[in-house]
Amino acid sequence: MYEVKLDAFNGPLDLLLHLIQEFEIDIYDIPMKSLTEQYMQYIHTMKQLEINIASEYLVMASELLMIKSKMLLPQSEEDEPVEDDPREDLVGRLIEYQNYKAYTEILTDKKEEREHYFSKHPTDLSHLESNETWDENQTIDLTKLIIAYQKVKNRVDYQTPKAVEIHKETFTIQQATHVVTERLADHDEFNFFSLFHFNEPVEMVVTHFLAILEMAKSGLINIEQPKDFEDIQIYRGVNYGVGNG
């Protein structure tokens, strides 16, 4: 005899769900007679086709017949306690299996979607870490610094001719940093506005301002404004001179 193992269903609960969906049966009010007949017809068909039937399918067949038999028993008298619905346990298992099956499909879809992505391992950036220190006591509100910058920029705008010339940048942040560093080499502190004659191009003012921000961030200088809208004082920072000598 040639036997074939049928894997169309993943167990008897899967087969029952298939029958319930195919015949549009209410899972919460299962007509046991109809469902049992459809299930037994499937088992009988498998035997005729000489397909190997797992024992769990036969166990479920026995359970369905038992539930069907209980449903055929006459109902209890009114003065006797009402027995539990014999279908209750089966319905609970079917609903639980149905939920697991739905979750499995969702997870399978997510797995297939995730297979389209490639995860990159973290890059070691420890060699880029800085040993610079920051003096938290020497801080200034960025808003105040921007106001001071705007005051200088406005003065330059008033005294700069309105004719526009396009030319290659000739003054860099490195040069502005050097100017500030050299000024602090001769003075413990100096006035922010003293860096300008107020006839420089706007680009030079901007370059000085960016250089001062970078130096303050690196701890090379400290900046302080005694009162609102007053000038900015520049001091040597905790990292001033580090690595220069």
Image (tube, helix red, strand yellow):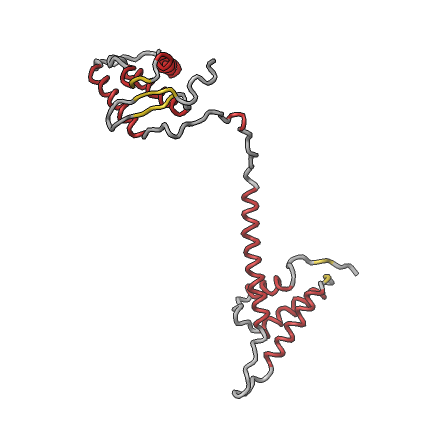
Q: Nearer the viewer, residue 29 or 232?
A: 232
Which x, y percent locates residue 120? Answer: 56, 34
Determine which quarter of the picture holds residue 184.
top left
Residue 114 lies, in percent from the top left, at: 55, 43
- Residue drawn at 62 percent across, 75 percent down: 67
**Residue 64 picture location, percent across and down:** 63, 72
Measured as percent of width and height from the top left, residue 48 is found at 72, 66
Residue 174 position (above or below residue 109): above
* Residue 169 visible, this angle: no
Residue at horizontal 29%, vertical 19%?
Answer: 192
Please state the total of marks drawn on the protein image: 0
User: For residue 140, what is the image quadrant?
Assistant: top left
Where 106 sits versus 61, above or below?
above
| Quadrant housing the N terminus | bottom right
Side of 82 where 226 appears, left or right: left
Report the residue at 61% width, 79% height from top: 70
Horizontal placement of 115 versus 147: left or right? right
Q: Residue furthest right?
A: 1
Taking the spot 40% from the left edge, 15% from the top edge, the residue there is 174
Q: Is residue 97 above or below residue 192?
A: below
Q: Residue furthest left?
A: 158
Query: Taking 45 as reference, is 164 left or right?
Result: left
Residue 200 in sight: yes
